[in-house]
Amino acid sequence: MKKIIMTGLAVVLLGAMAGCSSQTEIKKPVTETKEVSKTTGSSSKDTKTSGSKDTKTSTDTKSLNEVKIITLNEASEIYTKAHPKTDIISMELEYEKGDFFYKVKGVDDTNKYKMLINASSKEIKKDKEKKLESDDKVNRAEAKLGLKDIQTVDKVTEIAEKEAGAGKAKEWQLKKELGVTFWEVEVKDGHKETKVKLDAKSGKVLEKKQED
């Protein structure tokens, strides 16, 4: 009789231990489910950050036809109003920090000037004046830019982009050398850059250089 009771107790104890063991095994999947959920949340957060960066990049690559800017003549007038007794020797249009700017350079007999104008708001961002050094002195009559009958920024952009074959114009320079006034337009397509030099009045392509 005692042997039967002891055997019964052993069976009960083994059953209890088996029950505890199976309860412990059931808890594991619950913990694993929480970890998967946490990882998914983190992945979602990374996606948002990536989306934010893409938006910023697209803003940083604005093309000229996406914004309204003042003309070359208007930028010239802003400069001349501030420095009426000087001659403009070069003008540039460039994209920087999310906006377009005109950079106007001028000279008189003793000083050189550089003005930075926001091409959208007409605001003068910088206006610098510096003494001319001996090697800076130029023949004002020869270096002076004449803006009469000059091809517009929009027109030279169209010509330069067509000549480059692909990409968008990002920088424009109007200069005068050896009596010839010309535009130099830089077109960018990814890491590839093409510089197109055009006669400022006729729009004829004078030179094309490609850099990878």
Image (cartoon, rainbow, N blue to C red):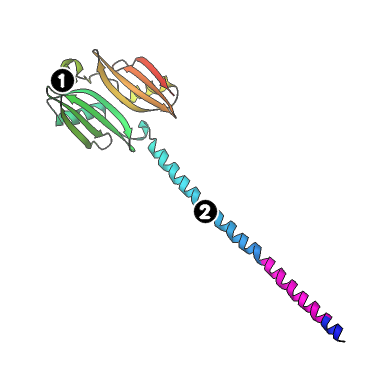
Does residue 147 appear left or right of residue 40 in this picture? left
Q: Kindly state the secondary structure of the residue where label 1 is placed.
A: helix
Viewer-proximal residue among 209 and 185: 209
Residue projecting furthest to the bottom:
1
> How many residues crowd around disc 2 within 10 Å: few (fewer than 14), some, or many (20 or more)?
few
Residue 16 sits in quarter: bottom right
Q: Quadrant of the N terminus?
A: bottom right
Q: Which mark is residue 42?
A: 2
Helix, strand or loop at label 2? It is helix
Task: Report the residue at 74% width, 73% height from top.
Answer: 17
Q: Which residues are magenta?
A: 7-26
Q: Amino acid at mark 2?
A: Ser
Please provide percent x and percent y for residue 150. Answer: 27, 20
Please check the rendered image and state whether residue 179 is part of the magenta-colored stretch, yes or no: no
Residue 193 image point, x, y percent: 41, 25
What's the residue at 29%, 29% (across, down)?
A: 93
Residue 28 left/right relative to 62? right
Q: Nearer the viewer, residue 164 or 21?
A: 21
| Disc 1: CA contacts within 10 A as few (<14), some (14-19) or many (>=20) | few
Q: CA distance from mark 2 to mark 1?
A: 63 Å
> Residue 142, relative to residue 186: is it above or below?
above
Q: Tell me if 45 is positioned left or right of 151 in this view.
A: right
Residue 54, compared with residue 38, is above or below; it is above
Q: Could you say which is closer to the camera, residue 13 or residue 27? A: 13
**Quarter of the rendering containing residue 206:** top left
Of tags 2 and 1, the one toward the viewer is 1
Image disc number at residue 134: 1
Give the image location of residue 124, x and y in percent. Answer: 21, 36
